[in-house]
């Protein structure tokens, strides 16, 4: 088992990465605040893992469950409320612990439910998709979408631990594996050129679900995320680089309807837009665009924007991004392979050209 | 002008108490994070004060407004979502500041909206009812109700400042003035026997809306609340005493339907139940029950539980209270006039007798 730590003083927590952890889950759990557990999962994950998880946890606590509908289109206040309803119907008190068993949507909603239920209870992440294992389960960003913008409602709220069982990736649909790899590639682009090269050399193994390759990719991704989050938990600066491609990507997701494009798919196109704009501004050498495109294509990810997305539509949707300040769109761009900055220092013309080009 | 400080380290903030502050509002505002303000109010308060507030604030920022329906029955996730919709439609960014202009419902919802919008923006309280001026605007408890329990969804999130204009009390309906006085009496019961005596001597002046009496009652109430909150912001112990009568009161509010009994009215009956139980347990001298009842009656507050509320109904609704741990109901009780504790150390029989007696 590999164990990393997200260093946040009193709120530090471990990330355990291993295969086949569900049967020994109770031994990996942090000390519980009380004797109640609520496992939150969805209709896709429940038939696969819920029984084993509940069985293992029943030895240490009273376990209740709530099963949400599956999909980004359900990541809203109504579904969140169904978690509160389950907690109240089962009379969970403020010493309860919530467990997120599922992908990024389940994790984000469970985390926000934990942040808000009785003004805050503990929660634990058990991410079951590659995307949630390398990104959304680590770092404490929780929340739901609003019809007018993605992740606009939420809280910074850290889990007590993150438990990653890479065996869950065996049942993950190909399209979701690819979506997770988009975020893995992101870490190479923004923070670690050597890791980017490793991905160029090992993409075939990752796509073939080679266990050792997956473990390394997850571990390195979590290390980078943990390091960035430790330095800037509340995103007053550095942390924003984790959003490479996300401002473009959120616009695609919002415009197409939540759930039509997977988050990682939209981020794939968004990262290529960020790379394209960085090159247009003269900050990045041309070859990075080809290398990034080739790697994303090898991961079977989309590399062109959907036809429906005009530059005007992009600009309109990007104007409600959380990084917008005083009506200026701010973007994460690259100054080298492995080095990112957040900036509003680009011309509208260059941005317009990028929106047409990718 | 009187100014107190809620001492919370980096998150300390001032409470300003004065008459006629709306015209000089811009000079009392803390330094704003950005140039955007969103004033949240309701259909009752808007016609009275919104224009003056917006006019005064327009000199320092771009001001937008959102007007909520008035009443505890609208303190829910749907109404909260309408605040997010207004913020997104007007393209407010994460440097915006929300202003709660209204009573406790507006303040609680605006505070939770600020805690959750883009994972946290600043907010300022301008409470316009006595209840919100002496209680809910101070201390950072924010949130909304769930159909199955009051204030079950929310966050601890402190405002940047609290601005109290006692002139707003001139337009407050009698019933709401009384509801606010219930919380004022609470401070005497739990923390300050001298203040309780002062209230016995000055209740006629308060009910006659005497300015000096109101200012003193508000100031002393805010001082006590600020002191308790400074010692225990997240209610791990002491702070719970501020809930004297609230576990009983929330049960009445939930059972009768939100908004039928005002919060302060339900707390009035609840405090008498807490006093009755404290006396039954032999912790408190008998005379306190008569003095508390007389004072509450002088404030035109209800002193008997509604007929619909059977002991069984009370017990069932009190079991989802936030102070319940391991299925034990915990209550704030008095060990002397001016001294309160939170305890589960009472028999079901004594509680049952109290529920029948008051």
Image: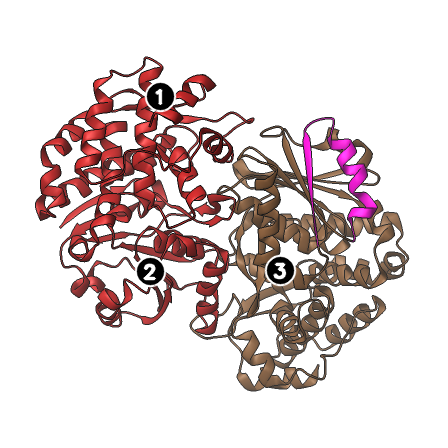
Chain colours: A brown, B red
Question: Residue at position x 32%, y 65% from top?
Answer: B43
Q: Position of residue A217 (x, y in %)?
A: 78, 52
Give the number of the mark in front: 1 or 3.
Answer: 1
* Residue under disc 2 on the same chain as residue under disc 3: no
As rendered, which of B54 and B330 lies closer to the eye?
A: B330
Q: Are marks 1 and 3 in contact (CB under 8 Å)?
A: no
First to last magenta residue range: A44-68
Q: Position of residue B326 (x, y in %)?
A: 56, 26
Disc with the residue nearer the chain's start (2 vs 1): 2
Q: Position of residue A321 (x, y in %)?
A: 54, 69
* Residue under disc 1 on the same chain as residue under disc 3: no
Q: Secondary structure at mark 3?
A: helix
- In the image, is residue B336 above or below residue B42? above
User: Magenta stretch containing residue A74, yes or no?
Assistant: no
Label 1 belongs to which residue?
Answer: B277
Chain that bears disc 3: A
Question: Residue at position x 67%, y 56% from top?
Answer: A105
Chain that bears disc 1: B
Quarter placement of the N terminus of chain A: top right
Question: Residue at position x 37%, y 45% from top?
Answer: B140
- In the image, is residue A120 above or below residue A136? above
Q: Of the numbered discs in the image, which one, if any, rests on residue A242?
A: 3
Q: Is residue A232 visible?
A: no
Distance CA(mark 2)–CA(mark 3): 31 Å
Distance CA(mark 1)–CA(mark 3): 56 Å
Label 2 belongs to which residue?
Answer: B99
């Amino acid at each position: 088992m590999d164990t990393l730590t997200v260093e946040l003083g009193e709120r530090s927590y471990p990330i355990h990465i291993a295969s086949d952890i569900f049967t020994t889950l109770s031994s990996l759990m942090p000390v519980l605040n009380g004797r109640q557990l609520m496992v939150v999962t969805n209709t896709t994950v429940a038939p696969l893992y819920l029984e084993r998880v509940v069985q293992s946890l029943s030895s240490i606590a009273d376990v209740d469950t709530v099963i949400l509908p599956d999909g980004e289109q359900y990541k809203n206040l109504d579904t969140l409320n169904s978690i509160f309803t389950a907690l109240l119907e089962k009379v969970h008190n403020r010493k309860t612990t919530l467990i997120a068993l599922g992908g990024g949507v389940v994790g984000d909603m469970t985390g926000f439910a934990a942040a808000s239920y009785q003004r805050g209870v503990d929660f634990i992440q058990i991410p079951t998709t590659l995307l949630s294992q390398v990104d959304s389960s680590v770092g404490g960003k929780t929340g739901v979408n609003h019809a007018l913008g993605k992740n606009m409602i939420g809280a910074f709220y850290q889990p007590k631990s993150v438990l990653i069982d890479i065996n869950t990736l065996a049942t993950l649909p190909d399209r979701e594996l690819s979506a997770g790899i988009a975020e893995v590639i992101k870490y190479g682009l923004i923070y670690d050129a050597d890791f980017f090269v490793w991905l160029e050399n090992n993409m075939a193994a990752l796509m073939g679900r080679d266990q050792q390759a997956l473990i390394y990719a997850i571990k390195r991704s979590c290390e980078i995320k943990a390091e960035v989050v430790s330095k800037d938990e509340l995103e007053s600066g550095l942390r924003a680089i984790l959003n490479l491609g996300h401002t473009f990507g959120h616009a695609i997701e919002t415009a197409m309807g939540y759930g039509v494009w997977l988050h990682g798919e939209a981020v794939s196109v968004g990262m290529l837009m960020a790379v394209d704009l960085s090159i247009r501004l003269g900050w990045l050498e041309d070859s990075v665009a080809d290398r990034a495109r080739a790697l994303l294509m090898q991961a079977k990810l989309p590399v062109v924007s959907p036809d429906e997305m005009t530059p005007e539509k992009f600009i309109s949707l990007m104007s409600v991004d959380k990084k917008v300040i005083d009506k200026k769109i701010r973007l994460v761009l690259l100054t080298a392979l492995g080095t990112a900055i957040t900036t509003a220092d680009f011309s509208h013309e260059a941005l317009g050209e990028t929106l047409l080009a990718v």
